Amino acid sequence: MDNGIWATWYDLADDANSPGRDAFLDWLHGDYLPGIQSRAGIAWAAHYQITGGGAKMQEIHDKLARAEGDDIGTGTQFLMLAGAASPHVFADPRIDEWEARQGEPAKSMLAKRIGTRTSIFTQEEFVTGPEFDARPACSTPGPAIQMGSFRTRTVADEFDLAAWYAQYRLPNMSRMPGCIATRKLVSVAGWAKHSVMYEFTSLDARQQHFQNHESLALNKAEWTNKIITYTIHAPGSPSVGKRIWPPVNE
C-alpha cells in the first residue's frame, strides 16, 4: 500500500543549459532519490519535470485564484514525490527535519532548489483507469501526471467538491483512455488541504483523451466550471509533467 504521499515542488536557479543543473539532476537521480526510496516504509520515489499542459490548460490556469504569502513556495519547474504505506512514515521521524540535517554534498545540492513547497498527503480515494495494467500496484506513478493542490473558499464548497469528485470526476477517470489511475488526496501537513494526482501513460495520451474533458472547466454551464471559481490553487497548480526518474522505457 502507498496511502501516504510526500510531494515537493521547486525551481532550480540554474537554467536548462547549465552544467550546474545537470550535476544536480545526476546527484538527485543517482544518490538522493534512491536513498529516500531505501528508507524503511517508503515504497517508491519519483521525479517529474513540469512541462505544461497546452493552450487550453493555460487558459484554465489563468482563471484560477492563487495562494499568496511569503511562506508558500512558488516553485513550478519540478515535482519530487515519494510514496509510503502511511503518511506517518514521513512524520515519524519527520522527513523535513531529516532533509534539513543532511551533510555534504546533499546540503549544497539541496540549496540549489528555490521556491520549495512541500506537503504530506493521505489518500482519500483511488480509482484505476483503463491502463492500470501499465504499472504494478503501489509502484512508481506513471510516465505522465497532472497534480493539483488547492483549498476551497468556504466550508459549503467542501461538500460540493466532495460530491463532484465522487459523482463526476472520478467515475469519468475510471473510463478515460490513457489513464492509469487517479488519487484524490487530502493534506496531513502543508499549505494545500486538497490534492489530486492523475496518472497517464504519456503526455500525448493526456493531451488526446483528457484535455477536452478538463477544458469543460471553461464552460459556465458545466459543474467543473463551478469548481474552478471556488478553489484557490498553489503556484503553478495543476502541474502537468513527465517522469524523468526512474527513467521511462519508451
Image: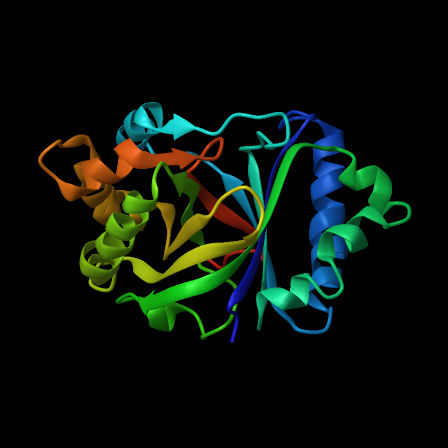
Q: Image point 36% across, 67% down: which residue? A: 126
Horizontal and vertical percent for residue 238?
Answer: 40, 39
Q: Nearer the viewer, residue 186 or 135?
A: 186
Q: Nearer the viewer, residue 237 or 159?
A: 159
Q: Residue furthest front?
A: 155
Task: Tell me where residue 204 sits by quadrant.
Answer: top left
Q: Image point 74% across, 30% down: which residue? A: 19
Q: Image point 43% across, 49% down: which residue? A: 194
- Residue 89 lies, with reference to residue 154, above or below; the image says below
Instruction: Give the mark count.
Output: 0
Q: Image point 30% across, 48% down: which residue? A: 206
Q: Nearer the viewer, residue 27 or 232?
A: 232
Q: Residue furthest right?
A: 104
Horizontal and vertical percent for residue 79?
Answer: 56, 44
Image color mode: rainbow
Horizontal and vertical percent for residue 128?
Answer: 32, 68
Task: Tell me where residue 35 sits by quadrant.
Answer: bottom right
- Residue 176 lies, with reference to residue 3, above or below; the image says above
Horizontal and vertical percent for residue 232?
Answer: 40, 34
Determine whether, in the image, residue 216 is placed left or right of residue 181: left
Determine whether, in the image, residue 215 is placed left or right of residue 43: left
Determine whether, in the image, residue 32 is placed left or right of residue 77: right
- The image quadrant where one finds the C terminus is bottom left
